[in-house]
Amino acid sequence: MKFPGKRKSKHYFPVNARDPLLISVPVEAESMGWLVGIDQTMVDIEAKVDDDFLSRYGLTGGYSFILEDDVSEALYQELRQRNLLSHQFAGGTVGNTLHNYSMLADDRSILLGVICNNIHIGDYAYRYLCNTSSRMDLNHMQGVDGAIGRCYTLINSAGERTFAINPGDINQLRPESIPEEVIAGASALLLTSYLLRAKPGEPMPEAAMQAIEYAKKHHVPVVLTLGTRHIIADDPQFWRDFLRDHVSILAMNEEEALDLTGENDPLLATDKALEWVDLVLCTAGPAGLYMGGFTEEASKRKTNLPLLPGAIAEFNQYEFSRAMRASDCEQPLKVYSHIAPYMGGPEKIMNTNGAGDGALAALLHDLSANIYHRQKVPNSNKHQHHYLTYSSLSQVCKYANRVSYQVLHQHSPRLSRGLPEREDSLEEAYWDR
Ligand SMILES: Nc1ncnc2c1ncn2[C@@H]1O[C@H](COP(=O)(O)OP(=O)(O)OP(=O)(O)O)[C@@H](O)[C@H]1O
Ligand SMILES: O=c1[nH]cnc2c1ncn2[C@@H]1O[C@H](CO)[C@@H](O)[C@H]1O
């Protein structure tokens, strides 16, 4: 596993060359950890369209819709005949995040979802596999006789993207296809609110609930990324209860945050969400990203960066602290951090699709690095408390932001490679323009 954050200096730990002083400490064999997630398996098919096109198909800009078969066919035929189709990539918000995690951490992730029993060269399932990191384990997927999903990613002249999905069999994942041991050994279980968007009788929501049950049984943190704002807006109270009952880590953008919490300000929305979960990542497009979480009062660490004004005065005061679950703290203290887009954002944004998935992948890398380090060096003073993250909130923000930048720089929602090798330290990456 590659380590996140400052790898050159004080946070670097050469976990492969075991410290002779620690040799007597019994350590389990190799890393047992992996990141597991459930997704609706789909390819993104990108097309440039105008607003008239969207309204003719009853699509609202920025949202994600499920299409009926006849509408989907008509939409596809029009895109093809007018030569509007441009790129095709493997997609799915959880699939993207697992792929990015595997690229960043050089570590295993496991995808649960459906895949076609019969794959032919060039078909969508084939392309999905071709565009997926070899570190992503697909051996536990469930075979289906039908198709995987097609997600038409419609970009208008303002660069806003709208998803229109031909679902195929994406929601046919059954609860019995969720292997308990795969959840039990994971560093985290990643889910998306899209999984609960199924037709009556489709088993996907039950499969997601089965995975949550196993995760709770084995004390594996459940991470939820909010798919698109209208799923939340349909029933915000349902989602607040869902978060409170099932979720440890929440990832959302500022629009989803508004519909969830009623707060327009991403910092206040982050703060509000801490009523239900332990750690929050709230991305805010050109305004960068926020994180909020808990730390043990006795282990809080003061920032040496400028104190920031905001709806919570000097909110980043303790951003050098590491995140913990509230229930693992004797005296929980709320801590927050914010970062502006890396280098102000790329000069030319190719596509914002997947920027949030990239940020979450960085956070999940930091989380599993912590578990890996705890297994290897259990008596390190880094594990005096039961932390969730390896690095401070401030450092995780930097890392998440750096990864989002990389995604904005390219068309695909998935990283085509890891971060440049010469970036041995995030500090260098930040200041060496
Ligand atoms: N226009 C922009 N200029 C500069 N940086 C941006 C811009 N848009 C996004 N970013 C960067 O990307 C990060 C994530 O972006 P955003 O909030 O758009 O994610 P998202 O809506 O969750 O994306 P997706 O759902 O497609 O993965 C931001 O925190 C910021 O660092
Ligand atoms: O309904 C859905 N289920 C799963 N993933 C989706 C859905 N709609 C859009 N995306 C995915 O979201 C990614 C960007 O975050 C896109 O790559 C798209 O494939």
Image (cartoon, helix red, strand yellow):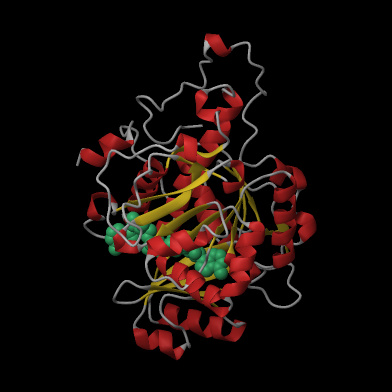
Q: Quadrant of the C terminus?
A: top left
> Can you give x and y, in whole percent of width and height, for residue 169 in the image?
67, 69
Give the quarter the ligand 1 occupies: bottom left
Q: Residue at x 33, y 38 (%)?
A: 420
Q: Residue at x 69, y 44 (%)?
A: 219
Decide if residue 196 is on the left or right side of residue 275: right
Give the vertical position of 59 relative to 326 (above or below): below
Residue furthest left in the image: 433
Q: Nearer the viewer, residue 46 or 19?
A: 19
Residue furthest bottom in the image: 56
Give the vertical position of 261 relative to 387 (above or below): below
> Can you give x and y, in whole percent of width and height, for residue 186 in the image?
65, 42
Q: Quadrant of residue 197?
A: bottom right
Q: Note whether residue 279 is visible.
A: yes
Q: Residue at x 47, y 46 (%)?
A: 363
> Can you give x and y, in whole percent of width and height, for residue 380 in the image?
53, 22
Residue furthest right in the image: 176
> Can you give x and y, in whole percent of width and height, for residue 163 in the image?
47, 73
Decide if residue 257 is on the left or right side of residue 242: left
Decide if residue 205 is on the left or right side of residue 301: right
Image label count: 0
